[in-house]
Image: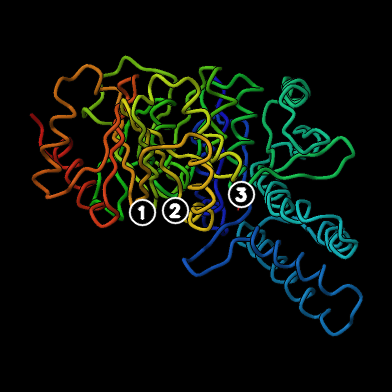
Amino acid sequence: MKKVVKFGGSSLASAEQFKKVGRIISKDETRRYVIPSAPGKRTPDDTKVTDMLYSCYGQALLEDDSEDCETSFVEQFHNIEERYNSIIEGLGLSLDLSEEFKIIRTNFSRKVGRDYAASRGEYLNGIIMAAYLDYEFIDAADVIFFDENGNFDAEKTDQILSARLEHTERAVIPGFYGSRPDGRVQTFSRGGSDITGSIVAKAVHADMYENWTDVSGFLIADPRVVKNPKPIDVITYRELRELSYMGATVLHEDAIFPVRKEGIPINIRNTNSPEDKGTLIVEDTCRKPRFVITGVAGKKDFASITVEKAMMNSEVGFCKRVLEVFEQNDISIEHMPSGIDTMTIFVHQDEFEEKEQKVIAGIHRAVEPDFLELESDLALIAVVGRGMRATRGTSGRIFSALAHANVNVKMIDQGSSELNIIIGVRNHDFAAAINAIYDIFVKTII
Ligand code: ASP
């Protein structure tokens, strides 16, 4: 049995947090490969080390060779050193990072790159973690690779990483970065240590990828909208994708792909409450879901463009021509329900607003519609659950719940997989709609 365990920034923000992590790892000897993030916030108004590094590097760029500003760069760098030294001290380690700091500082002055700068947060935390656990330290730049265009090179990484770890019993591999063919360091997008964890889990054929953070997994609804929502015990990858409106803050979306096809479950766990089982993310499961819906999540601030034309459905290429207008204007489409003679396109309002007149003109030119209508301040809500397939009357229950809550439904669309129902409402009905749906499926058990 092998587990890969990734710890997020808040789990490693201080020596106290490191100690919790140490206890978690020593409790289960199958936790053999550890992926640390950089130290995160210790308090809500604290700054993450990654952000400190970005800012410090920005300062290094600004300062060029001018002496006046030099203090600011040095000062900022010193604050970063302090963060690490206080962890080392708090853990009682006899580790000295001053040589590492010196090299990094010189590289900052030589302006070796923003990605390099950001990656040092994980790199240094990895060295501390390895010393604390007495695990081998493996620099991610030696085992995680990007190609010359900056895209992740899955094949090369898998080959070299699996070979490297095959005979390595226990190791710490910092998250978030790797290297390009020319040796330059490159990072994933923000929150990317989740992706490193997933890549390592695939390379070692782990039985489980545990992702330790500061919440006990996913909740059925957003706690800022619904009071005390219940946790989700098990969710499938597909359900999670459908609920991507809510998942982003807990797990990086791209962390799913490496493990998904390998049948490696991801378990979201809480470092501050390790006895909680958290949420298990799996390819599929026979386990009956606790509720008909697995989750309900939504987002506000969409605009919709409805295009109507008699006999539209028999005109070959109609939809394509409409969609091309959006492509030409570089607007991504969120959702697209259609009727016999109408199609509606949902887009992010902020992305659309400044281009709306160009889009209208483009659609007129492309398909000569009978009627075109724009609406704004709309919200989309995804009701998702593998349990919906086997349950009759799900949409009926949603509608009656919304009617009781006085919410006017602008649009409804059920995916053909019967895994999700998307509902469009006005922005100001958003919270009432989500609460009504949560209540009818989770609070009212029939
Ligand atoms: N430290 C990086 C960030 O703040 C990566 C991560 O934590 O996953 O985005």
Q: Is residue 40 left or right of residue 422?
A: right
Give left or right: position of 205 versus 69.
left
Q: Position of residue 429 (x, y in %)?
A: 23, 53
Q: Upstream in the sequence, badge 2 or badge 3? A: 3
Identity, as a three-letter code, of the amino acid under mark 2: Gln
Q: Residue furthest bottom?
A: 68
Question: Quadrant of the image for the C terminus?
Answer: top left
Which residue is label 2 attached to?
A: 349
Tell me where residue 45 appears, x and y as whole percent. 50, 70
- Which numbered dot is residue 376? 1
* Contact, mark 1 vs mark 3 (Cβ under 8 Å): no
Q: Residue at x 81, y 72 (%)?
A: 62
Mark 3 C-beta to ligand 1 under 8 Å: yes
Q: In whole angstroms, how far apart are the C-alphas of marks 1 and 3?
A: 30 Å
- Density class for disc 1 (Cα within 10 Å; few <14, some 14-19, many ≥20) is some
Horizontal side, residue 195 vs residue 60: left or right: left
Residue under circle 3? Answer: 190
Q: Quadrant of residue 246?
A: top left
- The amino acid pointed to by label 3 is Arg
CA gap between label 1 and label 2 equals 7 Å
Q: Are marks 1 and 2 in contact (CB under 8 Å)?
A: yes
